[in-house]
Amino acid sequence: MTSPLRLGIAGIGTVGTGTIRILQRHADLLEARGGRPIEIKAVSSRNRNKDRGVRLGEYEWEDDPVALARRDDIDVFVELIGGEDGPAKDAVEAAIEAGHDVVTANKALLAHHGQALAERAEAQGAVLRFEAAVAGGIPCVKALTEGLAGNEITRVMGVMNGTCNYILTRMESAGLTYDQVFAEASELGYLEADPTLDVGGIDAGHKLALLASIAFGTKVDFDGVALEGIERIKIEDIRHAADMGFAVKLLGVAQMTGRGLEARMSPCLVPQTSPLGQLDGATNMVVLDGDAVGQVVLRGAGAGEGPTASAVLSDIVDIARGNRVSTFGQPAARLVPARRAEAATPAPFYLRMVLTDRPGALAKIAARLGEAGISIDRMRQYDHTEGSAPVLIVTHRAMRRALDEAIDAMADTGVLEGEIVALRIEDV
Ligand code: NDP
Ligand code: HSE
């Protein structure tokens, strides 16, 4: 019989439990697909006595994930602890030094240390795989590294944080405020332990940085992703967008421009009738544009026990098969530094602001836009009260830099009440 592939699994939380369940439930199927039995040798978590609703008695236990990573009776170290540093990083580094292959679902770890870890793994002859780290159950890493390997990728785009998509779509469908839906998401257990990772766009930014690296052959550059969260989106933004035929989405876009790699994760308006505009609830969507294939749209569950574990198993079965694809689709040492091109492509923008209701206020705002070379497409004053005038402006195509200059200049007009919300209208 072919020798089994022996796993050490660290982290038996949502994803770890799901992974163990699939390994137990589908042992025969996985053996047939992987060409050899796949068995769990040992596991590690903090609390040995916790009931996790899954059989663990047959596996050896390690209190320390680093000790598990160093064991010489495992072939693959499966890191499902999480966190950009700390035990997850220590254990992955230890596993690589021991020459083990590594499978992880940890986008934070890879967004910050993926380049160094991939280079070290390759030097050791080990593979480091991370399908579960991006868009949960959607096989977008495999699609980019393998299925679309014959294409020059022109753009990677998508909704990659289910929590934000849940919040935005629920605000729209139930007419609830951001704060109300945030509380709901928290009760449902959707939010990360640190919710700013979700609503601040950081978690989705991690994922975009990883996909951009594969797509454009560039070193992982999370700091190069222009991040903006959804915290400032109000129910009226959702309603105005809907009135104009748009939906608000936390959208990631990475594209190679003449000036370099433009990567941003920010709330945008997309046509309601587009696949992205119709994406409801905690679902994710990844849209890949290749020069030969055209557009490929992948949609599915971006989180949760089953979907994320499904992606972990995809990497494990690949390793069992001997499919040793490089972490980012080509040797890590060949990846080039990303030349950052911030806001390199123009777009129309949606602006919402509240003005002090006095003669000439609107004219001052329009003048600042004009001085920055930005032309107004549509403008409307709504829900007018005695002292203040909420105003909605849609611009013609403009560069974000010019818009930011205009917004800065508006601060000196003395007619603005509060902050301006500026949302890009994305061409999807
Ligand atoms: P959980 O918090 O549910 O599980 C984390 C596990 O790690 C727990 O079992 C915990 O142990 C264990 N752990 C924490 N610290 C240590 C330590 N020092 N030593 C050993 N074990 C430790 O997280 P998830 O399962 O949700 O997430 C795991 C990874 O998967 C993360 O990187 C996450 O970003 C990623 N991911 C998660 C998704 C999801 O839907 N949940 C989706 C996509 C990716 P104990 O139980 O004993 O406290
Ligand atoms: N917090 C993430 C989300 C989990 O909401 O999509 C999956 O990475």
Image (cartoon, rainbow, N blue to C red):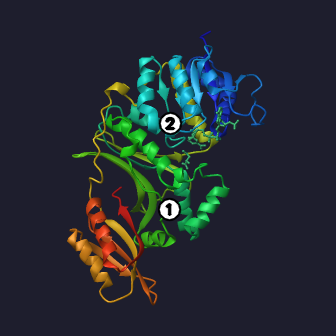
Which residue occupies 51% across, 70% down? 235
Viewer-closest of 396 and 121: 121
Task: Give the quadrant of the C terminus.
Answer: bottom left
**In this rendering, would 180 be left or right of 356?**
right
Marked residue nearer the N-terminal end (1 or 2): 2
Q: Is residue 163 above or below residue 140?
A: below
Q: Amino acid at mark 1?
A: Glu
Q: Position of residue 208 (x, y in %)?
A: 42, 44
CB at disc 1 and ligand 2 closer than 8 Å: no
Label ID, residue 231: 1
| Residue placed under numbered mark 2 in the picture | 109
Query: Does 118 sit left or right of 406 as displayed?
Result: right
Image location (x, y in percent) of residue 77: 58, 24
Q: Residue at x 50, y 43 (%)?
A: 135
Q: Secondary structure at mark 1?
A: loop
Question: Would you say residue 101 is visible in this rendering?
Answer: no
Quadrant position of residue 39: top right
Q: Is mark 2 within 8 Å of ligand 1?
A: yes
Q: Residues within 10 Å of mark 1 (few under 14, many from 20)?
A: some
**Within 10 Å of the Cα at label 2, are there few (<14), some (14-19), or many (20+) other Cα atoms?**
many
Residue ID at (47%, 52%): 201
